[in-house]
Amino acid sequence: MGLGHLPRAPGTWGSLGALVLYLLLSPWLDLRAELIVVLSLSLLGVWAAGRMAAVRGVEDPQEVVIDEIAGQWLALVSAGASFWAVLAFFLFRLFDILKPPPVRLAERLPGGWGIMADDLVAGLLANFCWQILRVFLGAR
């Protein structure tokens, strides 16, 4: 959809696009459907990102944002259209930018696997954090 070609921070644009799409679709998706979307985006992303990296001759092409979209969706799983979805967006961006050790380690995988894995780990961490916070606060 061209998000990777927008100026400055294509990863943030990709994540924001994923958030908007999630918010629009979440009323009709259950947990299983959300996970199927994440799995489908991830498998497509491994192939597409790996192919684009090979064609362009770079490790992680900036214009490829399917990794951010899949990772953001993983961060959003079961958030619904709520405050938690917005928090998941910001947590995902934080982990994707700062790349704490598990994210940085995943990035070392070869080809499309590495391009996708770091964002999926960042998404998993973001989801874990907002879910724990929600339980800790006793919120729904």
Image (spheres, helix red, strand yellow):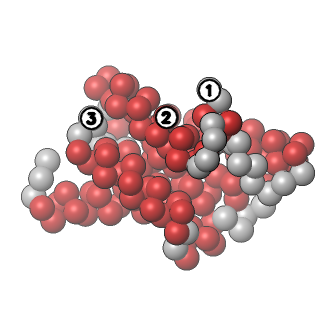
- Which residue position is annotated with label 1? 1
Cα separation, mark 3 vs mark 2, equals: 14 Å
Residues 84 and 29: in front is 84
Residues 65 and 41: in front is 65
Instruction: Where is residue 36? Give x, y as percent.
Output: 49, 35
Seen in the picture, residue 100 relative to 36 is either above or below; the reply is: below
SS assignment at label 1: loop
- Which residue position is annotated with label 3? 81
Residues 36 and 76: in front is 76
Quarter where residue 2 is shown: top right
Of marks 2 and 1, which one's residue comes earlier in the chain? 1
Q: Are marks 2 and 1 in contact (CB under 8 Å)?
A: yes
SS assignment at label 3: loop
- Which residue position is annotated with label 2? 17
Q: Alpha-carbon neighbours of circle 3 within 10 Å: few (<14), some, or many (≥20)?
A: some
Instruction: Where is residue 28? Give x, y as percent.
Output: 32, 23
Name the residue located 72 percent from the left edge and 64 percent from the top edge.
109
Q: Are marks 3 and 2 in contact (CB under 8 Å)?
A: no
Q: Point out the frontmost of discs 1 and 3.
A: 1
Q: Amino acid at mark 1?
A: Met
Q: Amino acid at mark 3?
A: Ala
